[in-house]
Structure formats: structure tokens, C-alpha cells
């Protein structure tokens, strides 16, 4: 048994140590710039337009076509006022669904002019510093314009050897940490608990029931359809009722599995869940200022 484990460990180390060479060779094969995935962007923006109109209370208007301007500009005429605070999170969710990870800039233009009314970039979103977020906005007719900035995939003289050393060190240390994880960290993290909960069919809290498999919240005799991330976030909160979960725990549990962590998205999704559970007086999501959130369930 010990010999078998030793052989497996050696093979793991060999595979891990060859990864830097594979990554390096693949980087060298790639062209200087990534092409713009027009069809995926089209689908992502139409999904975003649908979500924005839904949030604004418009559930009947058709979603207008996406207009391509030049090589990397995409415009969709919403012809409607939108909830600006929801826009960054919705765009990030839309692009993640379509596996679009290029940097971008967003501008909201007036319907009848090219005047820029609002705007931000993907860097602003990742840093949680979107301009004008949280401020009261005047209802206006908008055109949404997204400009993508192609990412250079060349090495650009970066110290690749540092990344290789880090990868090698991780390959040596991670197996030890994993083997000793219970002794080092005690109980399982919120992420592990949430994964265990996702295996079950339903999670009960208060008078509500969350059907994880069907992504449906049953509350007060009504069924509310949830998105994948709404379901995941609510399942993590419901797995530890009446306990404060830090922002870091929630972000890691809901977003970090795909390598995307967007701090502002958490607040947007919490706001959405609050609206969905507002009819149940026994359940509420409270804010622990400066720490995180807690799903309060009345006894």
C-alpha cells in the first residue's frame, strides 16, 4: 500500500514539474493577439440586455440586435432606463457564461446622441471601484457600448522563471498541506460545506426550501427560478444559518472555482436574493458591517 502511494506521489511530481515547460511551449505557439469572439459577445450582450430590462420591470419588449462597430466595438440600443448598479455584475456574469475573459470598457450613451453619460472598465469591476456605483441615477434612455481590448499573449520579457519556480514549489507543498489540512485548519471551510450541500436535493431554512438541482426557491407557496450563482450563494448561506460568513468566504465559495472573483458582484447577488425572500418574515439576509453577511432564520 505504501509503495503504491509512493509511486503515485512520484508520478504526480513528475507531471506537475513538466507543466511549466508545456505552458511555455503553448505560449510560444499562440499568435500575438487573440481574435474577438463576435458570436459569443453577441450572445453575452443579448443575455445582459434581457437581464437589465427584466430588472427594470420590462418583461415584454424585444431585445434589440447587437451592432458591431469596427473591429472591437459592440453596441446594443436598450431604448430604456436601466438599474446602473446591476450592470457590472450582469456583464461579468454574461461574459463568464460565454468564456470571454478579455479586458473591456463600457460606456452608456444617450439614445439620441453620442454623449457619454456613464462608464467604467473591467479593471474597475475587478477592483470593486466602479464610478458612480451606489449613486442615484436619473432615468434616461440608454445605448450600451462595450469596447474590447485584445490581450497580447506574447511573453513581453516577463520573468517566466518566477512563475515556474512558484509552480514547482506549489507542487511540493500542496500535497503536504492537503494531507494535513484537518490538523492545520480544523473544520472544513464554507466552500467545502457548500459543495456537500449542493449534492443534496433540497435545503430547508425557515419556511423556505431551496431545490438546488432545479435551481428553484420555494417560498410562501410560490416557486422562484434562480440563476446558477444565486443558487450557489443561497445554498452557502443556508448551510450555516444565523452565522456570519465573511465576504472572502462567500466570494471563494461562489466565484473562485472559475478563477473569477468580482467583489461588487456579491453585493448585487445579495440584493437579488433579498428581493426573492422578502415575503418570508422568518428569513432575512443581514449585513455584518465590514465583515460579510448572515442568513437569519427565526426559531
Image (cartoon, helix red, strand yellow):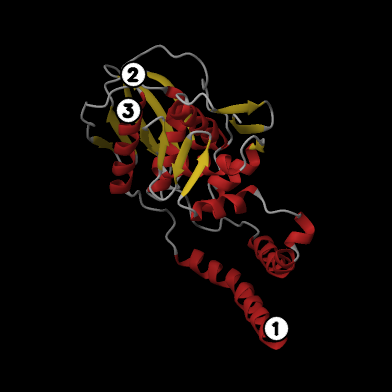
Distance from the alpha carbon under mark 3 to that under mark 2: 11 Å
Which numbered circle lies on residue 54?
3
- Above or below — where is 265 with respect to 174? above
Q: Nearer the viewer, mark 3 or mark 2?
A: 3
Distance from the alpha carbon under mark 1 to that under mark 3: 56 Å
Distance from the alpha carbon under mark 2 to that under mark 1: 62 Å
37 lies left or right of 253 = left
| Nearest to the observer: residue 187 or residue 36 | 187
Tell me the SS state at disc 2. Answer: loop
In the rendered image, residue 7, in percent from the top left (x then y), is placed at 66, 85
Mark 3 is surrounded, within 10 Å at the Cα level, by few (under 14), some (14 to 19) or many (20 or more) other residues, namely some
Residue wearing tag 1: 6
Asked if labels 1 and 2 touch by Cβ distance under 8 angstroms, the answer is: no
State the quadrant of the N terminus.
Answer: bottom right
Mark 2 is surrounded, within 10 Å at the Cα level, by few (under 14), some (14 to 19) or many (20 or more) other residues, namely some
In the rendered image, residue 237, in percent from the top left (x then y), is placed at 57, 39
Tell me the SS state at disc 3. Answer: helix
Tell me the SS state at disc 1. Answer: helix
Asked if labels 2 and 3 touch by Cβ distance under 8 angstroms, the answer is: no
In the rendered image, residue 281, in percent from the top left (x then y), is placed at 51, 23
Q: Residue at the spot x=42%, y=53% of the render? A: 33
Furthest toward the right, the residue is: 183
- Above or below — where is 286 with respect to 210? above
| Residue 71 seen in the current view | no
50 lies left or right of 183 = left
In the rendered image, residue 95, in percent from the top left (x then y), is placed at 40, 43
| Nearest to the observer: residue 281 or residue 214 | 281
Image quarter of residue 79: top left
| Nearest to the observer: residue 200 or residue 133 | 200
Residue wearing tag 2: 81
Which numbered circle lies on residue 168?
none
Amino acid at each position: 500500500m505504501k509503495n503504491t502511494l509512493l509511486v503515485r506521489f512520484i508520478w504526480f511530481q513528475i507531471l506537475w514539474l513538466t507543466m511549466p515547460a508545456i505552458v511555455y511551449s503553448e505560449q510560444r505557439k499562440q499568435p500575438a493577439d487573440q481574435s474577438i469572439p463576435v458570436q459569443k459577445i453577441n450572445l453575452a450582450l443579448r443575455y445582459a440586455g434581457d437581464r437589465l430590462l427584466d430588472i427594470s420591470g420590462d418583461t415584454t419588449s424585444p431585445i434589440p440586435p447587437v451592432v458591431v462597430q469596427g473591429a472591437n466595438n459592440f453596441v446594443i440600443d436598450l431604448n430604456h432606463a436601466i438599474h446602473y448598479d446591476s450592470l457590472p455584475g450582469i456583464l461579468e456574469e454574461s461574459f463568464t457564461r460565454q468564456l470571454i475573459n478579455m479586458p473591456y470598457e463600457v460606456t452608456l450613451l444617450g439614445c439620441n446622441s453620442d454623449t457619454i453619460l456613464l462608464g467604467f472598465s473591467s479593471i474597475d469591476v475587478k477592483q470593486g471601484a466602479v464610478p458612480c456605483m451606489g449613486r442615484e441615477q436619473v432615468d434616461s434612455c440608454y445605448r450600451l457600448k462595450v469596447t474590447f481590448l485584445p490581450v497580447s499573449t506574447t511573453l513581453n520579457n516577463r520573468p517566466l522563471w518566477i512563475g515556474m519556480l512558484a509552480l514547482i514549489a506549489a507542487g511540493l507543498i500542496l500535497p503536504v498541506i492537503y494531507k494535513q489540512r484537518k490538523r492545520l485548519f480544523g473544520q472544513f471551510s464554507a466552500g467545502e460545506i457548500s459543495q456537500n450541500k449542493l449534492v443534496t436535493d433540497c435545503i430547508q431554512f425557515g419556511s423556505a426550501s431551496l431545490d438546488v438541482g432545479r435551481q428553484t426557491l420555494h417560498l410562501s407557496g410560490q416557486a422562484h427560478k434562480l440563476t446558477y450563482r444565486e443558487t450557489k450563494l443561497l445554498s452557502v448561506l443556508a448551510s450555516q444559518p444565523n452565522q456570519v460568513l465573511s465576504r472572502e468566504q462567500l466570494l471563494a465559495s461562489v466565484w473562485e472555482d472559475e478563477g473569477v472573483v468580482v467583489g461588487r458582484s456579491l453585493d448585487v447577488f445579495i440584493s437579488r436574493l433579498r428581493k426573492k425572500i422578502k415575503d418570508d418574515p422568518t428569513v432575512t439576509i443581514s449585513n455584518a458591517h465590514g465583515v460579510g453577511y448572515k442568513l437569519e432564520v427565526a426559531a
